[in-house]
């Protein structure tokens, strides 16, 4: 009887761990980068961003959610986790050492794409209209 209970407990624990790890590591497929709380009157539409695709190709989260290097060379891990939005730190205008949100996105996203293109690698969009796609 005790052996059966032990096996049941181990199986239940395994099942719970599987469910929790699936929840923890699940990646949202598509993310809309609009930040309407910052860009109240944006001239361009929000960016539809395929987070899952980027995560598959670049599984090191810190490549984008980031260790920030200040102009004086100081480095700081500024990412608090998946629930943190870019606009939690980056605002409409530059504050102290933090880039404004638009510049942060453009340097991080477009900057990476331009670097890859320059190195001859397959990459994503590099012009405004390729990211900010207007409805027809």
Image (spheres, helix red, strand yellow):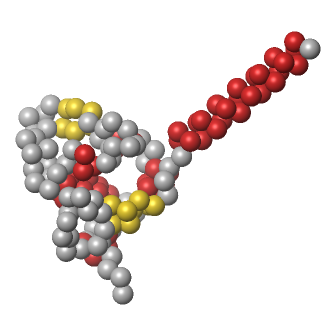
Q: Specify the quadrant of the image occupied by residue 132.
A: bottom left
Residue displayed at 27% across by 49% down: 86
Query: Is any atom of residue 111 visible in this view?
Result: no
Q: Specify the quadrant of the image occupied by residue 79.
A: top left
For the C terminus, the quadrant is: bottom left
3 left or right, relative to 44? right
Q: Is 10 rendered above or below residue 122?
A: above
130 left or right, relative to 68? right
Give the x, y percent position of residue 68: 22, 39
Give the x, y percent position of residue 58: 43, 48
Residue displayed at 32% across by 80% down: 134
> How many numbered marks does the figure carry?
0
Q: Nearer the viewer, residue 104 or 35?
A: 35
Q: Furthest-bottom residue in view?
A: 136
For the N terminus, the quadrant is: top right
Q: Is 93 rendered above or below residue 42?
A: above
Residue displayed at 7% across by 41% down: 96
Q: Furthest-top residue in view?
A: 2
Q: Specify the quadrant of the image occupied by residue 109.
A: bottom left
Query: Is any atom of residue 34 visible in this view?
Result: yes
Give the x, y percent position of residue 5: 84, 18
Residue displayed at 30% across by 63% down: 34
Q: Furthest-right residue in view?
A: 1
Give the x, y percent position of residue 47: 33, 66
């Amino acid at each position: 009887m005790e052996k059966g209970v032990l096996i049941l407990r181990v199986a239940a624990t395994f099942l719970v761990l599987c469910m929790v790890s699936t929840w923890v590591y699940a990646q949202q497929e598509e993310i809309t980068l609009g930040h309407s709380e910052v860009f109240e009157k944006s001239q361009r539409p929000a960016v539809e961003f395929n987070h899952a695709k980027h995560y598959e190709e670049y599984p090191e989260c810190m490549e984008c959610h980031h260790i920030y290097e200040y102009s004086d060379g100081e480095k700081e891990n500024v990412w608090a986790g998946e629930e943190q939005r870019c606009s939690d730190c980056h605002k409409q205008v530059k504050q102290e050492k933090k880039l404004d949100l638009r510049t942060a996105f453009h340097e991080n996203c477009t900057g990476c794409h331009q670097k890859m293109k320059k190195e001859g690698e397959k990459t994503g969009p590099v012009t405004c209209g390729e990211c900010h796609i207007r409805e027809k």
